[in-house]
Structure formats: structure tokens, C-alpha cells
Image (tube, rainbow, N blue to C red):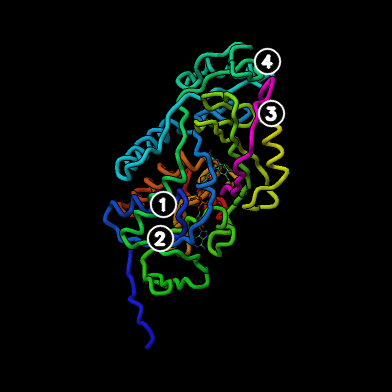
Amino acid sequence: MAKKTQSYSCDFLIVGQGLAGSLMAWRLWHTGARIMVVDPGGNNASKVAAGLVSPVTGKRWVKMRQVDELLHQARRTYRRLEMELEIRLWFEHKLLRLHQSRAESSLSKRRATEPGYRDFLAAELEPGCAGHGLVDDFGGRWIEGAAHLATTPLLESLRSWLEERNVLRSHSIAYADLKVGETGIQWRDVRCDFVIFCEGWKVIHNPWFAGLPWQPSAGEILTLESPDPLPPHPLNRGIWLLPEGKGRIRIGATYRWHPLDEAPCEEGVGHLLASFRKLFHTPPRYRCQTAAAGVRPNTLDHHPMVGAHPRFPRLILANGFGSKGTLYAPWCSEKLTEHLTQGHPLPPEISIGRYLERADGK
Ligand SMILES: Cc1cc2nc3c(=O)[nH]c(=O)nc-3n(C[C@H](O)[C@H](O)[C@H](O)COP(=O)(O)OP(=O)(O)OC[C@H]3O[C@@H](n4cnc5c(N)ncnc54)[C@H](O)[C@@H]3O)c2cc1C
């Protein structure tokens, strides 16, 4: 006799369990909403990422917009998750950024005097003072307010947390299986009021949201093992280094727009290893333990894309965290949760409304 499946009814069906989907699920659950998360499991950009956060980034040493608020929300969220899941997730530290030229050294000196930068750009390091065999011909500067998130432990713990509550399905949703109606949406045996799409870069295949200006980029990260002493603190000089202790260090990351492949490419791995060797006068011995790759959900204007579809308001998007998922996911998930449960307006800089308004010629 055929087994009768029981139908499940919920407020929000969340597609994807990367940082975006996991934090949305966790927040909505705590408001008392009924949720269901669908994700096939396996690798994703969030697990590949080193979870590094730096308030000042890029060749121009630019401070991220709203960085104080984003950092505050990230710290609050990850600390709460640490308590609830009983694991260490959030590590705050300084980051040493080594200058690559005289021009960069002048730029960082100038930036350090600008209002708004003083809290983040700390003491300059004179050439020859970095130690650990590092090439530091142009000196460097310590960046305050940096941190990193243990992304894989977070996602694995939240996956178990969802399983314990019986609100996780290990599936990949086929878009054609979503039946969108006036009064709700049906996916297989699940009936929901809203679908929140958090598929990361795979949103480029989403029939409702693929038309937005996505610019996904693939990238590699390596984990090296060395019997030699390694720098004990995170640092950046073209690439970043993140010590993990016990002779292990992570290095990254590359950027490539073609092909969008989740398997590491030889060229990317070669580039990271060559850049690693160039950091030192005498490179430490190393063995490459793992090479991982993922695809970032970047957007044309480098800002997240959050909000409801203009014609199908039951279809919601939470995506576009680009290279900064660790900082964006806590803040954006809070803003979207407040929007969905309390009717608060979304901040215009993350709302997909900014593109829809342009399309309307406003
Ligand atoms: C190499 C690399 C290094 C990075 N380093 C950093 C860093 O140091 N700091 C930082 O802040 N950010 C970093 N990032 C960026 C960060 O990883 C992303 O911003 C963030 O992880 C995006 O999270 P997400 O949840 O949107 O996407 P993802 O983590 O990709 O999650 C999307 C999920 O959706 C699921 N999914 C997709 N389609 C479907 C479907 N049809 N049905 C069901 N499930 C589906 C996927 O299986 C996946 O699990 C890095 C990214 C890469 C690739």
C-alpha cells in the first residue's frame, strides 16, 4: 500500500542553508514563525570562505559603508549563536597589512589621518619590523576591528539545530516544482506563505530573480601545513594568511569570473602558492593539505539584494553578500526579519527596489 505523506504547513520556506539561509532560519524561528529549510548539503561558498572581516579593504584602503553598525551586529549575532550552540565561532584580532609599494604606504598614512578611519587604522610598522622572515620593504599598518568567523562549524551546528527541530529537508529545489498562488505557495507536500531564496550564486538560474545584475566570482583557498615557524597573526599582502595553529595556515583568495566552477583550478592554486612564497625572504617549507573553491554571489554595485519580487510578493530574496558574507549576513537577516514580521521598511541600499526603481525610469 502506498505510504501517505503528511503535508506540512509553514510561514516561510527557505531555499539554501549557507550563511544567508541559516541566519534567516535561526532569526525567524526565534520570532515564533514556522519555517522549513531546503538544502542538499555539501559544499557552498560559506563553508569554503575563511570568514575574514576587515573594516578597511581593497587597493584604495576604503572603509566599508556602515562598518560600525555591521560589526556591532555581527559581534552580537555570533556571540549569541556561540552561547546557544555552545561552540566558539567569532575571533576578534588585529590584521597586519603590509604595503606593496611606496605609493600604498603614502595612501595608508593619509587614510590614517582621515576622520572615521582613526579607530581602524592603528600604528604604522616601519620597514624591517614585521619579523617572521616577511618581506616588508615598504612597511605596513595594523588594522583594528578585524575578526574571523568559523563558518563550517557554524553551518554544521545550525544544520543539526534545524534537524533537531524537524525543519530541514535535504533536497535541491527544482524551480518548476514551486506552485506560486495568490494565497500561498506549494512545494511538494509543503505549503507556505512565503519562499525566501538564499541560493547564493545559483540565483543566476532562479526564474524570478535571475534578471538582477549578478556578477558571481569563483575563488580558491588553500590550507598549508609547515614544520617551520609561521607568522602567528593574520596578515595581508596581496593575498591574506590566517594562522590556524599547530603548523597550519589558510591562504586566499583568488578571483575569477570564468569558469564559475566549484572545483579548484590549477592556475588559482599556483597563483596562491607563488604569492605565499613571495611573502618571505626565505619561504617556509610547506605541504598543501587542502585546496577548496567556491563561488561568491557578487552584485554589480557590491551591495546585497534583499526584498520581495515586484509581481510575486510571496517570493523573497536574501542574497548578494559577495565577498563579505560574514559581515552582511547578520545585519541583512535582521533587517529582513524585521521587515517580514513587523513591517519595517528595508534599508534602501540593500533593497532590490533600487534596481526596480531604475527599471521604471524613476
Ligand atoms: C574563495 C572564497 C573566499 C571567501 N572569503 C570570505 C571571507 O574571508 N570573508 C567573508 O565575509 N566572505 C568570504 N567569502 C564570501 C562568502 O562566502 C559569501 O558572501 C557567503 O558565503 C554567501 O552566503 P550564501 O548563503 O548567500 O551562499 P552559499 O554559502 O553559497 O549558500 C547557498 C546555499 O544554497 C543552496 N542551494 C542553491 N540552490 C538551491 C536549490 N535549488 N535548492 C536548495 N538549495 C539550494 C546551496 O546548496 C548552498 O548550500 C568568500 C567566498 C569564496 C568563494
82 over 205 or under it: above or below: above
Question: Which residue, given by chain and number where applicable, does mark 3 sit on?
Answer: 277
Q: Are marks 2 and 1 in contact (CB under 8 Å)?
A: yes
Real-space CA distance between mark 2 and mark 4, rounded to the nearest whole angstrom = 51 Å
Q: Residue at x 49, y 66 (%)?
A: 173
Please name the amino acid that badge 1 sits on: Ser
- What is the secondary structure assignment of the residue under circle 4? loop
**Quarter holding residue 266:** top right
Q: CA distance from mark 3 to mark 4?
A: 16 Å
Between discs 2 and 4, the one toward the N terminus: 2
Q: Is the CB of the residue bearing disc 4 within 8 angstroms of ligand 1?
A: no
Magenta stretch holds residue 292: yes
Q: Nearer the viewer, residue 40 or 102?
A: 40
Mark 2 lies on residue: 37
Q: Which residue is mark 4?
A: 137
Q: Which mark is residue 22?
A: 1
State left or right for residue 179 relative to residue 263. left
Q: Is residue 221 above or below residue 99?
A: below
Question: How many neighbours does mark 1 have within 10 angstroms: few (below 14), some (14-19), or many (20 or more)?
Answer: many
Placement of the N terminus among the 4 image quadrants:
bottom left
Chain part drawn in magenta: 279-297
